[in-house]
Image (tube, rainbow, N blue to C red):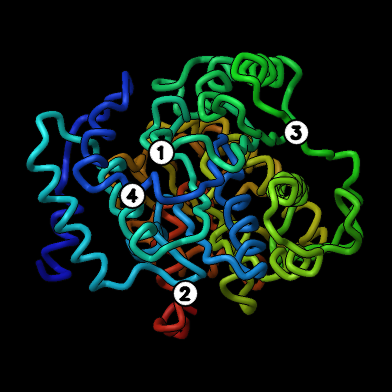
Amino acid sequence: MTLKETLEFIDSYSCPYKHYDLSRVYTLLELLGDPQKRLKFIHVTGTNGKGSTCAMIASILRKAGYRTALFTSPHILRYNERMVINGEQIPDEDLIRITETVKNAIEKTEEKVNWFEMVMCTALCWFAEQNADIVVFEVGVGGRLDGTNVIDVPECAVITNIGLDHTGQLGDTVEEIADVKAGIIKKNGSAVIYRNSPSVEKVIEDRCREVSAELTKADFNSIRAISEDIFGQTFDACGYKALHIPLTGEHQRKNACVALETVNVLRSKGWNISDDNIREGLEDTVWPVRMEVVSKDPLFIIDGGHNPQCAHAIADALTELIPSGTRIVFMTGIMADKNYEEFMRILSSVSKEFVTVAADYHRALSADDLAEFIDSLGLHATMCSTVEEGIKKAIEIADGGVVCCAGSLYLAGEARAIFSPDTSLNRLV
């Protein structure tokens, strides 16, 4: 296949999501030589923060000299972003070759894997072929019956912040969702968790007792903020002094604490990771569209947050880091199946001025409908027909202030592409 044919196959691949067992995934992986059995994993689930936490852990491991694979989703600009080794995305030629191998294997199966499982199997084949020392493996949705849960006992199972999302698949309460996510904790394994409500933590504690797994709760009491601006922050945590991450917000300090506890678990199992590796790894973490500044003049920030917890984090960061009295405009678009009503109400605590767009994705809420809802809150919304038009309009309305693009990772990807080094901002401002 050519690259064009490969991407067309990936884009057009369709099979219903089935969350009742993983037999179809085991069958496909067996046809592919069981690549997962030749790899070691850090398995990461959660509602919010799992991507950032994965990026920090992977960066630390890479600094320690380990050949570190990273599997995350969704991608922002290129499909290849989902599969990375030591910071390098899967080359096109490898993507073409391995996708064809996976495609041929799928054709031999009776029950087809879903789209995410197909992507994951492709990544596992590449990681095994490239002899990765360890894979930082992000769950797609949930945990227990997510395709990634075909792996054996990981070096560590990590559960980040849990909230209400994907309720149709995972449950109507945070406790039900926690139970699904705790399914990645395996017999005699190790688990690290982001601190949650007592009822959520009890669900995870019960799972650990059931499978005799060792549980570590991130020590948020050890965190002491030192300094922070829109480009990053310095803080103490878990006994380490003056750590720096290029990410903003209290939640990112807590995610870093989870990453540090995970590294401590790895050290206890013989992984050679120095304090300098930890410090340098955190400082060099790259995780786009999380309060990412893509333009300084005008100041334009992109965040892929899409649920109420994310909205609170965005609102808190802007309130704390942008000088009081600065004009802030939100350029926003969101998926119709998300809790956009609460998302917009939370953002309205920071600004009353919105520009609405619709990301190029079939689940996107129309810009008209979103603008109508925002206006119904007594706010002001301007509807734009394209993301580029929305960027121009938001910059114009901000008039020297700040624009924050938020509401969807799909929207964030489209907006970030417009601000990429290959694109001239001069045509926007």
- Closer to the observer: label 1 or label 2? 1
Q: Which mark is residue 216?
A: 3
In which quadrant of the rendered view does residue 205 lie? Answer: top right
- Closer to the observer: label 2 or label 3? 3
Q: Distance between the residues labelled 4 and 2?
A: 38 Å
Q: Residue 270 carries which label?
A: none
Q: Is residue 114 above or below residue 416?
A: above
In the figure, is residue 41 to the left or right of 366?
right
In the figure, is residue 53 to the left or right of 176?
right
Place of residue 364 in the rendered image (x, y in percent of width and height, measured from the top left):
34, 43
- Residue behind mark 2: 419
The amino acid sitting under disc 4 is Pro
The reply to whether discs 3 and 4 touch (Cβ–Cβ < 8 Å) is no
For the question of whether residue 77 can be seen, the reply is: no
N-terminal of the pair, mark 4 or mark 1, is 4
Place of residue 199 in the rendered image (x, y in percent of width and height, measured from the top left):
71, 14
The amino acid sitting under disc 1 is Thr
- Residue behind mark 1: 148
In the figure, is residue 235 to the left or right of 3?
right
- Which secondary structure lies at badge 2? loop
- Which secondary structure lies at badge 4? helix
N-terminal of the pair, mark 1 or mark 3, is 1
N-terminal of the pair, mark 3 or mark 4, is 4
